[in-house]
Amino acid sequence: MFRIITVHFWVLQGGGRGGEKKNKANYSPPSFPLHSLKSDLTLRLTRPNKPFPITTISHILKEEITHRLRDVRYDPVRSREMTLTLCEVIRTRMKEFMISRYKTVILVHIGQLNGQGLQISSRCLWDPNFDTFVSHSFKNTSLFCSATVYGIYFE
């Protein structure tokens, strides 16, 4: 649907020098019918076809982290490899669901458990209507793991 808009503006007469007389000019809409114009909008501003599967991804996080880290002792070199492996496995399992129009970000933190505290925070541009996240924490006798999956709707 198109609206006809009339624009009013002031025109300076006399070449822009001092003492000019101001006239009000009107813009009239084009003579051809506006309904004949076709819109070439390529941007799709709709809701997601299906919501981000929070419960399923939560189950995947819990299952993969518990299965892979249950009996593992903390080792700094091996922890780096394990974070990469966990991210890759979670990403592969999420691809099975073919979540359309969502970009996913997966963060995995593994550290030594020595009675210390840890705070993990993140910031991003967020649309609370469509964007979401899933998080899971795990610890055994020697290490802790925190994994977060962000689902950001891509318009």
Image (cartoon, helix red, strand yellow):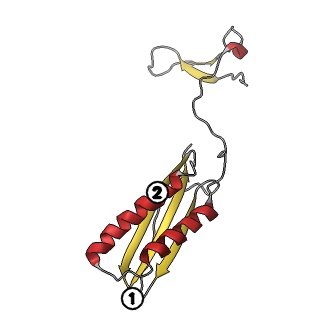
Q: Which residue is mark 2?
A: 91
Q: Which mark is nearer the camera, 1 or 2?
A: 2
In the rendered view, tell whether residue 115 sits above or below residue 88: below
Dot 1 and dot 2 residues touching (CB under 8 Å): no
Residue 103 x/y as whole percent? 50, 50
Neighbours of disc 1 within 10 Å: few (<14), some (14-19), many (20+): few
> Residue at position x 29%, y 79% from top?
75
Q: As shown in the figure, which amino acid type bears the numbered disc 1?
A: Gln
Q: Mark 2 Cα within 10 Å, few/some/many (few <14, many 20+)?
A: some
Camera-side residue of 130 and 9: 130
Q: CA distance from mark 1 to mark 2?
A: 30 Å
State the image coordinates of residue 61 (x, y, percent, origin top left): 52, 68
11 vs 136, nearest the viewer: 136
Say which residue appears at 54% left-offset and 72% top-offset. Answer: 62
**Residue 72 in which image quadrant:** bottom left
Q: Residue furthest bottom?
A: 115
Amino acid on which disc 2 is placed: Arg
Q: Quadrant of the C terminus?
A: top right
| x and y percentages locating residue 1 in the rendered image | 73, 25
The disc placed on residue 152 is none
**Residue sitting at 72 percent across and 16 percent down?**
35
Whether residue 120 is visible = no
Please name the residue that numbered disc 1 is placed on. 116
Residue at position x 61%, y 55% in the image: 52
Name the element at disc 1.
Answer: loop
Q: Quadrant of residue 46?
A: top right
Q: Position of residue 82 (x, y in %)?
A: 36, 69
Q: Residue furthest left?
A: 77
Horizontally, residue 122 falls left or right of residue 31, namely left
Quadrant in the picture for residue 56: bottom right
Query: Is residue 37 shown above or below 103?
Result: above
**Foreground pick, 102 / 21:** 102
